[in-house]
Every structure is written in C-alpha cells, then in structure tokens.
Image: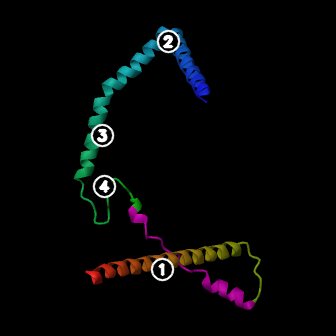
Amino acid sequence: MADTMFHHLHTWSSNLQHNLSDSVTRMTIQDYLRLVIIVGGYALLRPYLIQLGGRFQAKDHERELSEHETSSMAAMSPNSLRGQVSVPEDTDDEDDEEGETSGAVKTNDADWGRRARRRQREMIRKLLEAEERARAEEDEDSDKEIEEYLVKG
C-alpha cells in the first residue's frame, strides 16, 4: 500500500517537473510578452475593480430594506421560502366531478394533464397536512417537557 502511494507521488512529481520545464523551454518571446501583459494588466486593474465593487456595495448597503427583505441583494432568501408552500387552486374540480359521476371515460388529450394536476394538488395537501400534524405533535411534546420541569420545581 505504501509502495503504491510512493510510486504515485513520485510519478506525479516527475510529471509536474517535466511538464513545467517543458512548457517554460518551449515558450517563445510572444508567449512571454502575452503572459507579462496579462499579469501586469491584472495587477494594474485590480485596485480599480475593487474600488468599483466597493462603490456598488456601499450604495447597496445605504439603500433602505423593505420589511420582508432580509438582505439588499437577495431576491429571496432560503429562510423565506420555508413554510410558504401553497396549494394551487382547484379550477378543474367541477369538470372532473362531472366526468366521474357520469361514468363516461373522456378521451380528450388535455384530460390526462388535468387529472395529473389534481393528483399533484392532493399529494401536496396531504404532505402539508402531515407536516402540520408533525409540528403540532412536536409542539405538544415540548410543552409537556417544559411542564414537567415547571411542575417539579
């Protein structure tokens, strides 16, 4: 095991040395100039880019936030998404109930989508109800624990 690790490390180091020396010896004057221009341009422009970013950040921090906005740049925070799942309206309920009560099988292409949307809404409702029940049970359990400590004391 140690021999294979040593062998891999030796191979990687020799590859690095060979590739680095090869790339430096094969570089032409044009390649060196290109490298110097890129590194020099970055070194010269970096302070100005940082100042520009600082100005944008200062303007953003000075702006007043609305009451439901958590940060100035975030369109919506992950915390605001939690607990805000809504169930779509049942716009197709009357049509589905009529088709089910008449016993006629509809062959319209749009019907399979309507039934799928309805199943999806029902599933979302069930999940939300289960989540609410779990929260209520959790709250009751924590209340009982707190009550135990209060009664003992």
Expressed as whole percent of the image width and height from the top left, the position of residue 93 reads 61, 83
Give the amino acid at mark 1.
Answer: Arg
Expressed as whole percent of the image width and height from the top left, the position of residue 1 reads 61, 30
Q: Which mark is residue 72?
A: 4
Q: Nearer the viewer, mark 4 or mark 1?
A: 1
User: What is the span of residues highlighted in magenta in the rendered image?
Assistant: 79-102
Which residue is identified by label 3? 53
Sequence-first disc among 4 and 1: 4
Q: CA distance from mark 4 to mark 1?
A: 35 Å
Crowd band around label 3 with a 10 angstrom C-alpha radius: few (<14), some (14–19), many (20+) = few
Query: Farthest residue toward the left?
Result: 62
Q: Which mark is residue 133?
A: 1
Give the amino acid at mark 2.
Answer: Val
User: Is 45 in front, or is 17?
Assistant: 17
Q: Which mark is residue 27?
A: none
Sequence-first disc among 2 and 1: 2
81 drawn magenta: yes
Q: CA distance from mark 3 to mark 1?
A: 48 Å
